[in-house]
Amino acid sequence: MRKQLLVSFLCCLLASATSLAQNWKSYEKIAKGKTYETSDCVTLLDSTLVSVQPTGQGSFAVCKVIKVQTPRGAVANRVIKYDYDPLTAYAEFKRVTVYRANGKVDELDVKKTCDYAAPARAIYWGARQIMIEVGALQPGDVVDYEIAKKGFTYALLTAGDEDESRFIPPMRGQFYDIVPFWSNTPTVRKVYVVSIPMEKELQFQFYQGECTSSMRYEDGCKKYSFVMNDMVPFAKEPNMVDLFDAAPKLMMSSTPQCQDKSLWFNKVNEDYGSFAPLPEAQKKVDELIKGKKT
């Protein structure tokens, strides 16, 4: 019975994602003003719908609609890329549609998707990237695509299980996410919706800005919605900190209190021995503090 309910809910989620993506034409009409009109391309809609299972695993429907406005914008969007960590997640293109300025509609074959090791420098984490070639575009063309992802976002240093259990967060039963509310291109509407089981609570906080949020009960779940309209590119300065520390972002967790995750993570590291000093380093420290009172 639970499996049937889960399948039904996921079908509703995908249907909602598709319906939301198909409404991009209304956003095209309101993409007015200098910021939009002078950009090489405009994101008409950037939406993510998440279904959280009792285990804490998330099923994501990521939809994006981009309108090309200049030849430079056409070149920038001739290929679509999406990063994911294979240790904790899986991602695939569900559909890619190109609405041509001349009225023609092209459905791309998502079976031609490439999946390869993501470019890396300094530290190699084993991240991967899915990519599909859109091909030649013209000003006025609109690219509409959807990506299905399952799992969670988490940095692990070692590989875990190879089965479906790797998509369940190590803090079993808890969902956690950090959602950037910034973009390199003007965005008419940014939407993040997460549905969680009724028995779970969701703690959330928006930093470096504000968005519209709401919660309602639907299909036996709590559905939280976060929306930002007219999202302009975040201005960068020389030597500034990372955008995650300066630009608008949404942080959320289903733990009863925000500090619970930090305390859990601290204990995991203690049990693993992450905080244990190197014997050579400890010996040197002991020598330096020998006879010292403070």
Image (spheres, helix red, strand yellow):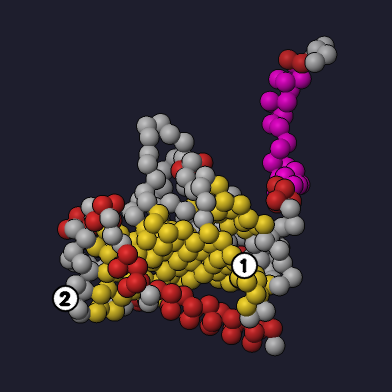
Q: What amino acid type is highlighted by mark number 2?
A: Asn
68 shown above or below 264: below
Q: Mark 2 points at which residue?
A: 102
Magenta stretch encompasses residue 208: no
Q: Name the residue under label 1.
A: 215
**First in residue order: circle 2 vs circle 1:** 2
Side (left or right) of 254 relative to 247: right
Q: In which quarter of the image is residue 118?
A: bottom left
Point 53% across, 83% down: residue: 11
132 shown above or below 264: below
Percent coordinates x, y for residue 260 in the rendering: 74, 51
Choose mark 2 or mark 1, whichever is in front: 1
Asked if residue 127 shows in the view, the reply is yes
Percent coordinates x, y for residue 172 in the rendering: 71, 63
Q: What amino acid type is highlighted by mark number 1?
A: Met
Percent coordinates x, y for residue 165 in the rendering: 64, 68
Q: Of 191 and 94, which appears nearest the observer?
A: 191
Kindly report the distance in space between the C-alpha atoms of the residues bearing marks 2 and 1. Answer: 41 Å
Side (left or right) of 165 relative to 286: left
* Magenta region, residue range: 263-287
